Image (tube, rainbow, N blue to C red):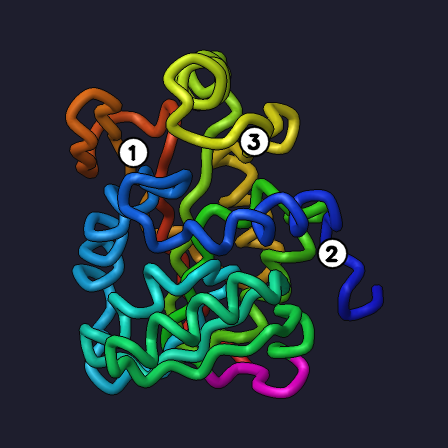
């Protein structure tokens, strides 16, 4: 597989075209702004971040990357959307955040920095790539022995179709239309299986509840729609 093979060009262009509005809390990414503090707390509760070497894969405009850096992590953040990386760099410079942003494929990062990260985050990406199993293998290759992997995605359930696609994209317009394709959504059992195949153990699956009326987000309940997962590479793995 070539370094850029696991990329959907249409998906990439879709998000890159919205880069200019990434940091607008009332814009097309406002649900991510609401979810970001909860995602950070999920990671911070399970992995020490102070001085940790962290890779944020599919970083977009840098929302989680800045939060991780603010928690004391040494962050490398990558995305293949040039507009997103430019927006992320500009925002980080304005805020004085020290983050290494690179417009780079995760396969290239894994090639040059294999098994060197304490924590890897990959939020809202795995459901947008052609080969999610291959992405899991690549993410595992970034982790040092004992390293922690955190993912967020959408479950492939009728509830997700009704709430996250029909409701959020077409009725409430909380997300741009076409953001998600139902067939590409990922079940927790698939995350677990792909993780095992990549040498990762699954520690947790937690539902991520979002209230579209109040824009409040919290962790809890069954992973019927949005959910977070925590996996790790065995301490003795090579």
Earlier sequence position, callout 3 versus callout 1: 3
Badge 2: residue crowd in 10 Å (few <14, some 14–19, many ≥20): some
Query: In the rendered view, would you say 212 is above or below 70?
Result: above
Image quadrant occupied by the C terminus: bottom right
- Kindly check if marks 1 and 2 are in contact, taking CB atoms under 8 A apart as contact: no
Front one among 59 and 123: 59
Residue plotted at (25% across, 30% down): 209
Residue plotted at (46% across, 33% down): 154
Which secondary structure lies at badge 2? loop
Seen in the image, is 104 located left or right of residue 166?
Answer: right
Numbered circle sitting on residue 180 = 3
Residue 190 within the segment the image draws in magenta: no
Residue position marked by numbered label 1 in the rendering: 207
Earlier sequence position, callout 1 versus callout 2: 2
Identify the image quadrant of residue 235. bottom left
Numbered circle sitting on residue 6 = 2
Seen in the image, is 13 located left or right of residue 4?
Answer: left
Seen in the image, is 14 located left or right of residue 6?
Answer: left
Residue plotted at (36% across, 40% down): 27
Q: CA distance from mark 3 to mark 2?
A: 17 Å
Q: Main secondary structure of the magenta part?
A: loop
Earlier sequence position, callout 3 versus callout 2: 2
Front one among 19 and 165: 19
Front one among 91 and 158: 91
Relative image position of residue 83 (x, y in whole percent): 57, 63
Relative image position of residue 87 (x, y in whole percent): 45, 66
Residue range highlighted in magenta? 111-116
Relative image position of residue 124 (x, y in whole percent): 47, 46
Residue plotted at (32% across, 49% down): 24
Relative image position of residue 18 (x, y in whole percent): 52, 48
Query: In the rendered view, would you say 140 is above or below 171?
Result: below
Which secondary structure lies at badge 3? loop
């Amino acid at each position: 597989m070539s370094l850029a093979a696991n990329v959907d060009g249409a998906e990439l262009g879709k998000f890159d075209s919205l880069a200019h509005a990434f940091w607008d809390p009332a814009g097309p990414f406002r649900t991510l702004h609401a979810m970001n503090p909860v995602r950070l707390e999920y990671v911070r509760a399970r992995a020490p971040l102070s001085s940790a070497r962290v890779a944020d894969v599919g970083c977009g405009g840098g929302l989680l990357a800045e939060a991780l850096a603010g928690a004391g992590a040494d962050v490398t953040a990558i995305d293949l959307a040039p507009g997103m990386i430019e927006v992320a760099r500009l925002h980080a410079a304005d805020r004085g955040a020290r983050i290494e942003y690179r417009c780079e494929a995760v396969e290239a990062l894994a090639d040059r920095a294999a098994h060197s990260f304490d924590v890897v985050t990959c939020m809202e990406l795995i459901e947008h790539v052609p080969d999610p199993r291959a992405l899991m293998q690549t993410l595992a290759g970034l982790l040092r022995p004992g390293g922690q992997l955190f993912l967020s995605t959408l479950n492939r359930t009728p509830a997700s179709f009704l709430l996250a696609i029909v409701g959020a994209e077409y009725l409430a317009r909380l997300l741009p239309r076409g953001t998600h394709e139902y067939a590409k959504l990922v079940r927790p059992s698939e995350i677990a299986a792909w993780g095992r195949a990549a040498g990762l153990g699954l520690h947790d699956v937690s539902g991520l509840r979002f209230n579209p009326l109040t824009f409040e987000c919290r962790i809890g309940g069954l992973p019927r729609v949005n959910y977070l997962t925590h996996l790790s590479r065995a301490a003795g793995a090579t």
